[in-house]
């Protein structure tokens, strides 16, 4: 395999978990729920995928378990932010912290190990053209989400709930129902992102293995302005940075420096985007 094709495969592998989680975050954003709990939902998906795949011998059941676990965990945000009208940011941070502690506790309780669980009996996802089926699913999800938000009545109502909830309610659309739906779908997508990370990119579980990818997905939502294609492009930027970091590590650069590459790109992109929006606001005469 050539160097270029190997790098491309690495980029696509890095892209899939970020893209899936970011699409879930974009749906929540369109519904008026700022979801920064993507990291915790992904981590719960990682553990559920590995635990189910190891116990059943079926990676497909592992993927299903990850999707269900992500959806179940997302109910914390749905109930807290939508029903009880709590602060979604505080809830999201708490969910991320809880997921780290909970999965670390379960790792020691269920598997009797600390740090990393890596067992030869653990079945990973099959590869098709060098990619797992979840990679192809993530690309299809971009097109489907774009269609739903721009053409389908469900997506149009979801946008209406996010932009003008009182007007949507007056027209007979339930903001609570649509926000619950968006949060639950985001949980499913984050669970799938975790399954890809644990059974597609590698075949193991380690404590806090999401390593900030959920936070990167949040930034991708912000940079892409919650538009599916914009989110894809932003996620691709970070995936290239992550894959390039691994490549540079192979060339002899310190691991600490290469591991920081995607996060440095995240901060730079967020800074540039924020600065650009402030300049545009000043030009239009808006209050910054």
Image: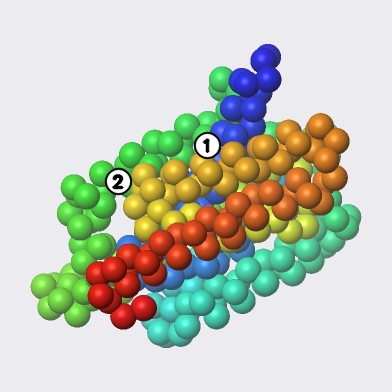
| In this view, 192 is above or below 3 | below
Query: Is the Cβ of the residue at disc 2 closer than 8 Å to that at disc 1?
Result: no
Tell me the residue at 61%/27% (across/down).
9
| In this view, 122 is above or below 80 | above
Tell me the residue at 46%/85% (across/down).
86
Residue on which disc 1 sits: 134
Q: Secondary structure at mark 1?
A: helix
Residue nearest the viewer, comparing 72 with 130: 130
* Location of residue 95 (image quadrant): bottom right
Residue 107, position as x, y percentages in the image: 80, 58
Residue sitting farthest toward the left: 171
**Cα–Cα gap, marks 2 and 1:** 18 Å
Q: Which mark is residue 238?
A: none
User: Is there any visible trace of residue 56 in the rendered image?
Assistant: no
User: Is there any visible trace of residue 155 in the rendered image?
Assistant: yes
Residue sitting farthest toward the right: 113
Residue sitting farthest toward the front: 283
Specify the quadrant that holds the N terminus: top right
Residue nearest the viewer, comparing 228 with 2: 2
Count residues near mark 1 (Cα–Cα under 10 Å), then give few for <14, some for 14-19, many for 20+.
many
| In this view, 3 is above or below 167 | above
Residue 267, position as x, y percentages in the image: 59, 60
Q: Secondary structure at mark 2?
A: helix
Residue on which disc 2 sits: 146
Count residues near mark 2 (Cα–Cα under 10 Å), then give few for <14, some for 14-19, many for 20+.
some
Residue 217, position as x, y percentages in the image: 53, 55
Mark in front: 2 vs 1: 2
Q: Which badge, 2 or 1, is on the more N-terminal residue?
A: 1
Residue 11, position as x, y percentages in the image: 60, 34
Residue nearest the viewer, comparing 46 with 236: 236
Tell me the residue at 47%/83% (across/down).
87
């Amino acid at each position: 395999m050539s160097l270029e094709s190997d790098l491309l495969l690495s980029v696509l592998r890095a892209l899939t978990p970020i893209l899936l989680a970011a699409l879930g975050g974009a749906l929540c954003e369109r519904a008026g729920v700022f979801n920064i709990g993507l990291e915790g939902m992904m981590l719960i998906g990682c553990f559920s995928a590995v635990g189910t795949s190891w116990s059943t011998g079926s990676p497909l059941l592992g993927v299903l378990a990850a999707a269900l676990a992500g959806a179940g965990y997302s109910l914390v945000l749905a109930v807290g932010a939508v029903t009880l009208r709590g602060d979604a940011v505080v809830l999201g941070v708490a969910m991320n912290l809880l997921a780290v502690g909970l999965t670390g506790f379960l790792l020691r309780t269920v598997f009797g190990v600390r740090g990393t669980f890596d067992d030869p009996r653990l079945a990973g996802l099959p590869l098709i053209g060098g990619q797992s089926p979840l990679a192809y699913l993530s690309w299809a999800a971009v097109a489907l989400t774009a269609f739903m938000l721009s053409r389908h009545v469900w997506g149009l109502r979801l946008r209406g709930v996010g932009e003008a909830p009182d007007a949507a309610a007056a027209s007979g659309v339930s903001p609570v129902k649509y926000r619950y739906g968006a949060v639950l779908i985001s949980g499913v997508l984050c669970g799938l992102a975790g399954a890809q990370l644990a059974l597609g990119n590698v075949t193991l579980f380690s404590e806090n293995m999401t390593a900030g990818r959920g936070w990167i997905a949040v930034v991708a939502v912000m940079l892409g302005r919650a538009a599916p294609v914009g989110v894809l492009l932003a996620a691709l930027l970070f995936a290239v940075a992550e894959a390039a970091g691994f490549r540079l590590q192979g060339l002899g650069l310190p691991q600490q420096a290469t591991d920081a590459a995607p996060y440095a790109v995240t901060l730079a992109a967020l800074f540039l985007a924020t600065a650009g929006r402030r300049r545009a606001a000043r030009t239009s005469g808006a209050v910054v």
